[in-house]
Amino acid sequence: MDSIEIVGGSRLAGSVRISGAKNAALPIMTAALLADGEHVFRNVPNLRDVHTMTRLLGRLGADASYEGGCVQVKASGAIEPTAPYDLVKQMRASVLVLGPLVARCGRAIVSLPGGCAIGARPIDQHLKGLEAMGADVELHHGYVEVIVPGGRLAGSDVAFDFPTHTGTENLKCAAVLAQGRTTLTNCAREPEVEELARVLNKMGARIEGAGTSVISIEGVESLHPVDHAIIPDRIEAGTFMVAAAATAGDVLLEGIGFEPLEAVVAKLREAGSTVEREGDGIRVVGSEVIQPTDIITQPHPGFPTDMQAQLMMLMCLAKGTSRITETVFENRFMHVSELNRMGANILVDGRTATVHGVTKLEGAEVMATDLRASASLVLAGLVAEGTTHVRRVYHLDRGYEHIEEKLAPLGANIKRVSGHA
Ligand code: UD1
């Protein structure tokens, strides 16, 4: 198993191109199940989760392949609507096949994703929506079985109890081929959720209100395949922004606009960084002194939970005390103990972490526990005194395209080492 070795202390400078968004690519790949013919998706990041999804689509009977940033999906033949445990357990986002399968096949059997490192993450909101649209839902032997009597879902009104990202995506995919109109309220408004609606409309769907909390979908008889390029990854971009801020660096992020990152930009500015638009990207110049700032994670357009661990690492070096409150997931502070082992001073009480800034972090052997926690440990390694080894980097590889190959040209002393546990 690989690890990442970082010798801290380098100031990052230069430019880096932002990859396509994982959380946009995954639901768009599953949406390909909704139309016969060959779809082409470009700017798809070369990530473990993308390869898992390609395998899952293959297991369902689609012809799916990844090559050089391009995913091709052909779902013309018979589709076997069963998503098995061995793939779902590797990636919770596998549950995104549920909506497309029910819409296309009138039934689906999908392994329940179960608990994961950052919380329980149930799918009750997804199932509630499908039931409202006329499906029968049964749970047995760790699987959820959804059957639509008559084969076609019926348009309905569904109000989410809270905005769920993949829940909104699943129900959108379910509703596009339903009989009649569906109105979804209290929807997730993340840019990736909006992007899925854009792609579905390009396929011939009739979705209004994408990107808002109320989405209206008029079901159509059929959809057609598309050729589409995936939007840039705002979380990868945000992670590089923190790298620049933490190292008092000067980094240009190419190919990403301000809009999806406004909450992150505001916090980096509060911390003392200069963040400006430049060309088709964003330039971040970190300051020598990092100011403390309080953060509360919220659904979009609030501060993203996927950037909480990275900002917490930055606050470890702030001149003062910051409070970071996690409201989206109930157990997303697993990076805290590892950061504390590197010399940070963080106390957790329930959903709030109090971060007392320290003057330096020290390199250590640390263990990645989930995707964004791993990113915060790599960032900590960049600024720590001495050498840091981040173990279990398979978590990192789920969501970052060769992070070491993107950080090294900016001046980071970082490499991947093969063969560590
Ligand atoms: C997606 C993202 C993930 C991000 C998260 C929040 C993908 C593939 N993943 O995850 O990177 O961190 O949004 O922005 O896009 N919940 C329920 N019942 C449900 C659905 C959700 O209780 O039916 C709870 C979850 O446990 C969690 C909260 O709602 O506490 C938000 O979850 P949700 O928005 O659904 O996250 P994901 O879609 O899994």
Image (spheres, rainbow, N blue to C red):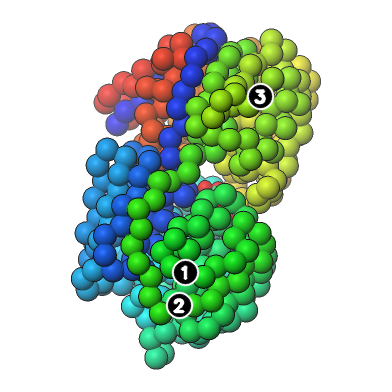
Snapshot quadrant of residue 124: bottom right
Q: CA distance from mark 2 to mark 1?
A: 6 Å
Task: Say which label, 2 or 1, has the lower sequence index.
Answer: 1
Residue at image coords 35%, 67% = 224
x, y (%) of residue 301? 68, 47
- The tag on residue 276 is 3
Seen in the image, is 60 located left or right of residue 240? Answer: left
> Which sits in the foreground, 328 or 142?
328
Residue at image coords 65%, 72% = 159
x, y (%) of residue 401? 38, 33
CB under 8 Å between callouts 2 and 1? yes
Label 2: few (<14), some or many (≥20) within 10 Å?
some
Q: Which image quarter holds the C terminus?
A: top left
Snapshot quadrant of residue 97: bottom left
Task: Say which label, 1 or 3, has the lower sequence index.
Answer: 1
> Residue flagged by tag 1: what amino acid is it?
Ala
> Residue flagged by tag 2: what amino acid is it?
Val
> Which sits in the foreground, 257 or 23?
257
> Residue flagged by tag 3: what amino acid is it?
Glu
